[in-house]
Amino acid sequence: REAEQLDFSPLGTTTAHKLVVYDKQENVIVSCDRVTIDFGIADLLRGNFAVERIKHVTLEGARIDLSQDATGKWNIEGLFKPISDDSQHFLGEVKVRGGSVSVSGQKGLTRLEQVEGALDFTSYPDVRALLAGRLGESNITAEGYWNASGAMKMNLQADRLESRQMMMVIPSVDKFAFQSGYLYDLKAVLHRDKGPVKIESDAFLSGLDAEIAGVKITDMQGRIRFADNILEIQDAGLLYDGQKLAANGTIDLTASKPRFDFIVKAESLDLKALLPKSPVVGTISFQVHGKGSPEELEVSGNFSIPAGAVSSTSFTDATGTFDFAKNILTFKTVNLESLGGRLSLSGAWDLKNALFKMDI
């Protein structure tokens, strides 16, 4: 630690200008334009300047740079020392004015600006925090505690997060990438007893573009929740190739590979616009259930087509069930009105090679 200048007041105030704190590798962790330390009047009169007698500390223009190495250890962890019964330690309050916090970890760089608030050390080694600041264009607040053992619980709220900031509160998922859009009304809890930090979060989606298992979707609206390593999407509306769909589902992250379990519904879609290579034209409504890993996704569903045509043959009142795997769409049962009667069909459609086989 070093300071450019120290000022002392007869009223018991000490001010350090341009204070800098380094980690063990001599990297700057904290720098501060001005630090003001206040002792109680009684301690001042007695000449008692022990650290535990400090009542208030004010940090103005503080800049905190936190970084995480490949093992998940933070640079600030080495600054804490175990407390023995005869240790002296700070038991006052720290006020923060106009600060900033940069967090560089395995999920990239995040910078919190215009930080205001307080840190309460009266229950040390628990440190309680109530802070507010700006994350990009978002207002964000944090309230909770952490301690020297590494345990922590922090409640976060934000009015809006951009897609690139979402991984702060939603773990990255293989085969699932956010590309643009926002989270609104975010509420998240970060907590740790031992091991990695666990995250629970709840927010609303708006205008979100994403790629899920190679499928690009746009303008997703809805609600998203994360808890117990399960990402849940509720009542989502989205666009796929300009076609409107509704979706609900989960992504389970407890295994080594994510497992999807979702239901997608659609009403009155243009079949040719949805599947350009389809030999069938008409307006389709369907419900699809997909589950499994991205590489071994099992899909099944049902559909209805009020009126349509295959080549020059028209039909009405078509309903059916199907499965989909490895680019093969298998129709288990299809019933429709055509050629003056009621027909029952089954067959398969190879989407990759545009081959279609049907048994009547």
Image: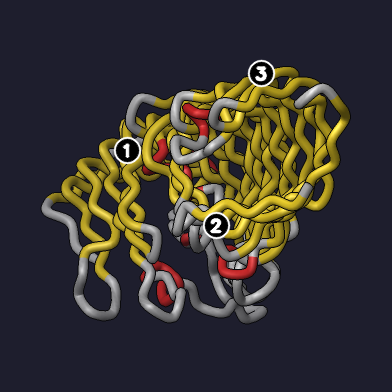
Residue highlighted by disc 2: 350
Q: Mark 1 against mark 3, which lies toward the viewer?
A: 3
The answer to whether mark 1 and mark 3 are in CB contact below 8 A is no
Badge 2, how many Cα within 10 Å: few under 14, some, many 20+? some
Q: Distance between the Cα atoms at labels 1 and 2?
A: 60 Å
Residue highlighted by disc 1: 99
Q: Mark 1 against mark 2, which lies toward the viewer?
A: 2
What residue is shown at x 47% (from left), y 52% (from top)? 354
Does 298 appear above or below 322?
A: below
Q: Amino acid at mark 3?
A: Ser
108 with respect to 122 (left or right): left
The quadrant of the picture occupied by the N terminus is bottom left
**Towards the viewer: 301 or 130:** 301
**Towards the viewer: 337 or 76:** 337
What residue is shown at x 75% (from left), y 52% (from top)? 359
SS for callout 2: strand
Q: Is residue 325 visible?
A: yes
Q: What x and y, as percent, mark residue 147?
A: 60, 64
Residue highlighted by disc 3: 268
The answer to whether mark 2 and mark 3 are in CB contact below 8 A is no
Q: What x and y, as percent, mark residue 43?
A: 51, 49
Q: Is residue 185 visible?
A: no
Q: Amino acid at mark 1?
A: Gly
